[in-house]
Amino acid sequence: MPMTPSASRKIAFIGSHSIRKTNAVHSFAGAVGRSGRSVEVGREVVRFNPLGFNEGATPEAQLWVLCAQIQQELELRNRAEVLVTDRAVIDNFAYFLRVTKGEDPFDVEPLVRRWCETYDLFVRLLPDVALLADGVRSTSDAFRDEIEAILDRILPLYIPDDRLVALHASEITERFDWGALLEKLFGAPDATRARRSQARYVRLTKLLPR
C-alpha cells in the first residue's frame, strides 16, 4: 500500500555525532524562512532517550530512537511547507546496527528502507572537526569512526545519489550560503515569493524601535 502523499518537503541532516548537525539544521531552517516558506524543525530525539545512548546503548534503546524519530516526523510533517530534521532513520539505523553487530532482532530493516523514501533530500555532514564535550554525546573518536564506517556501507543501499548531498562539517559556519541547497530542494528561486518575503521583512523592520 502506498504511503499518504504529503505536499510538504522534508530534508534531513545526517551523520555521526558532534559534527555540527544541529547548527546546520537551524541555519538552514532560517534560510528556508527567509525564502518565504514556513518551516518546522525536528529535534535530535536520542537526547530524550530514557533507555540510554552512546557506546553503552542497547538494541532496545536504539529501537526506541528509531520509533521516536518516525513518530516525530509524522507529527511535524504537515505543520509547515518544509520539515528540517536533526537526523533521520538512516543514521539512527547505523547506531542500531552497531549495537546489534549487524543483526536485525526486531525486523526494522523493511521499515527503515521504506521510510527513507519519505525524505526529499539528505545532507550528510562529514566529520572533519574535533569532538567537543557537550555533557551528552560521546567524545570517543573510535565510536564516531565506527558509525561513519557503517554509514559508508549502508547509505548507497538506501539513498539514491540524487537525494544525497555531502558537506564537510567545517563548512558549517554562520557565513555558509544555503542558496544551492535551497535550489536543489525547491528548484529555481521564485521571484514572486522572494519579493513577498522581502516586503514582509521591510514591514517588520519598520515596526522595530529605532
Image: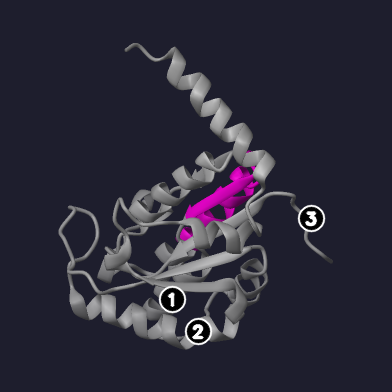
Query: The magenta stretch spans which residues?
Result: 64-85
Q: In which quarter of the image is the C terminus?
A: top left
Mark 1 to mark 2 CA distance (whole Å): 8 Å
List the residue tagged with mark 3: 4
Whether label 3 touches label 2, CB < 8 Å: no
Please give the name of the residue rendered at 78% of the width and 61% of the height, measured from the top-left corner: 3
* Residue lying at 40% horizontally and 63% vertically, measured from the top left: 61
* x and y percentages locating residue 132 in the rendered image: 16, 61
Give the colouring mode of the picture: one colour
Report the disc number at residue 94: 1
Mark closer to the chain start, 3 or 1:
3
Vertical arrangement, residue 166 with respect to residue 64, above or below: below
Nearest to N terminus: mark 1 or mark 2: 1
Q: Position of residue 4 (x, y in %)?
A: 79, 55
Picture coordinates of residue 14, whole percent (x, y): 44, 66
Q: Is residue 34 magenta?
A: no
**Residue that carries the numbered disc 2 in the rendered image:** 154
Q: Are marks 3 and 1 in contact (CB under 8 Å)?
A: no
